[in-house]
Amino acid sequence: MVGGLSYPLWVTQMKDIQKAALDEACVLAQNRAFYAALRDRDVDLMSQVWSQCSQVSCIHPGWQPLRGRETVMASWETILHHSNLPAIYPEQTSVQLYGDTAIVICEESFHDGRLVATNLFVREEDDWRLLHHQAGPLNSGSELDDDDDLFDEGDPDAVVAIDDHELTTQSGEHAALHGEPLEGGDGHMSGEELLALYVPSRGPRRFIN
């Protein structure tokens, strides 16, 4: 008996703990590799980090959802080729393991501010690969000191109203890659517009759920 457990059960539990610790370390390593690919503008590494599954997805700040590996990787290639892309570092990182799935939540720190990101990894061929990435603006704690700030005049049943112009500005009336062209335009964005979407200007923002 070891700690009140039979020896075989104790060994099994220790192996489970060690396996979970190893999985967490591997997921964190892949998460760091993802941001290293961003900083180094390494298209090959970015491709290796992402799952080979055709059903990957990505939501860049201000973009519409991108679905499919080809579309997602094309978006990263465009972003990585932009010379003004800032160095982004993951901070305040946490991992939650669910069998062959792992969720990483972290803050993306760069010289002008922070974003918050969710990275979903899956076990694939004895390694972990990125299946979904979503990043968006991060409000500072001072902007949300009171839960009532999220609602109109403290009424939890009334969501803050946002006029059409403000909502359009926040959501970014931009077509996803290979999506519908913008009205009055040719459907293409300059590198500066793409970068502006990935690294939006900082400032207080409110969102409608």
Image (cartoon, rainbow, N blue to C red):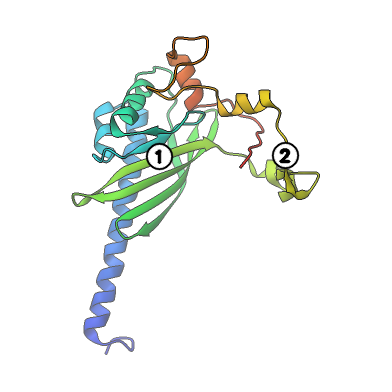
From the viewer's perspective, is the residue at label 2 or at label 1 nearer?
Answer: 2
Counting from the top left corner in percent of width and height, residue 181 is at 45, 16
Q: Is residue 8 above or below residue 184?
A: below
Drawn side of residue 57 relative to residue 182, left or right: left
Q: Is residue 146 above or below residue 168?
A: below
Q: Which residue is mark 1?
A: 133
Q: For residue 129, what is the image quadrant?
A: top left
Mark 1 residue type: His
Residue at the (39%, 32%) spot, across then down = 66
Q: Viewer-proximal residue, 145 or 184?
A: 184
Q: For residue 65, what is the image quadrant?
A: top left
Residue at the (43%, 25%) spot, across then down = 176
Q: Viewer-proximal residue, 112 or 80?
A: 80
At mark 1, the secondary structure is: strand
Sequence-wise, which precedes: disc 2 or disc 1? Answer: 1
Q: Quadrant of the C terminus?
A: top right
